[in-house]
Amino acid sequence: MRRVFGANWKMNGTVAGALEFLERMAGMGSSSVSPELVLFPPFTVLPMLRESAVRAGMALGGQDLFWEESGAYTGEISTGMLREAGAEWFLAGHSERRHVLGESDRIVRKKLEKGLRNGLKGILCVGELREEREEGRTEEVVRGQIDAALSGLEEASACNLVVAYEPVWAIGTGLTATPEEAERMHRLIRQWVGDLGGAVSPEELRIQYGGSVKPDNAADILSRPSIDGALVGGASLQADSFMAIVRSTPDGQ
């Protein structure tokens, strides 16, 4: 199974900075590593990155999308717009969309379904809040997110879908789940996807970990058999630290 690493820049980055990042990645041999690499920069810089992304061996993705192709939806972006800008991937259900901007499971499902139906590959983000974890509701919350997003979703397959387990309490806090905790949740997610009985093969599904992944903790986390890569936030803003994470696994050399 080919690992996948995503660099989620969130609301950071400029054209010049993104081009420099990709040039640095290419110089470090990113085009020859075995894992799949995806850059999620701000929408505004996507169209200017195509050629540099190809040289760096990286695909491009949108950090979000809308479920309609056009219309009176101020500030939104459609799948067609993303494809025209050079994106092949998109994120759905990132915790900041869920908990800062108030996106419900229903909205996440609509976005995921639209993106997959229109030929993009998606990363579905799931994870629990700190208070949910302290209440012992982690499994209930994450399974609910999985069920809401994937139940009956005919467009989803192991070829176009990745799940990212991102405990919300670990994102941007410097905290991270222990490798044992992360491995247990990844095994459960694989089991729950299998329980749905859809087109997504649980054995072939790639499940990433996200949540303060850094060069100094990546090797331990990624050594676990059920963890198939990482969705990286702050540590992906610099090519050196992102490549260090990719290269923390034997197939990233």
Image (cartoon, helix red, strand yellow):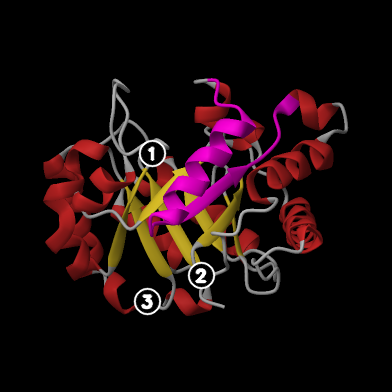
Query: 10 Å neighbourhood of mark 3: few (<14), some, or many (≥20)?
Result: some
Per the image, label 1 sits on a secondary structure element best described as loop
Mark 1 or mark 2: whose residue is earlier in sequence: 1
Of badges 3 and 1, the one in the foreground is 1
Instruction: Tell me, yes or no, if residue 35 can be seen here.
Output: yes
Residue 92's x, y, as percent? Answer: 50, 42
Identify the amino acid type marked 1. Leu
For marks 2 and 3, give the CA distance.
19 Å
Q: Position of residue 28 (x, y in %)?
A: 26, 69
Q: Nearer the viewer, mark 2 or mark 3?
A: 2
State which tag comes first along the sequence, 2 or 3.
Answer: 3
| Quadrant in which the N terminus appears | bottom right
Q: Is 166 on the left-hand or right-hand side of 7?
A: right
- In the image, taking residue 125 as reference, residue 19 lies left or right, namely left
Q: Mark 1 sits on what residue?
A: 65
Q: Amino acid at mark 3?
A: Val
Q: Residue at the location (16% across, 53% down)? A: 49
Q: What residue sits right under mark 2 in the picture?
A: 159
Specify few, some or many for label 1: CA neighbours under 10 Å numbering under 14, 14-19, or 20 or more.
many
Horizontal and vertical percent position of residue 136 = 88, 33
Name the residue carrying label 3.
33
The residue at the far right in this view is 136
Magenta-tinted stretch:
102-130
* Secondary element type, mark 3: loop
Picture residue at 42% right of the left edge, 40% below the top: 234
Q: Is residue 100 left or right of residue 201?
A: left
- Examine the structure image and report whether residue 119 is included in the region drawn in magenta: yes
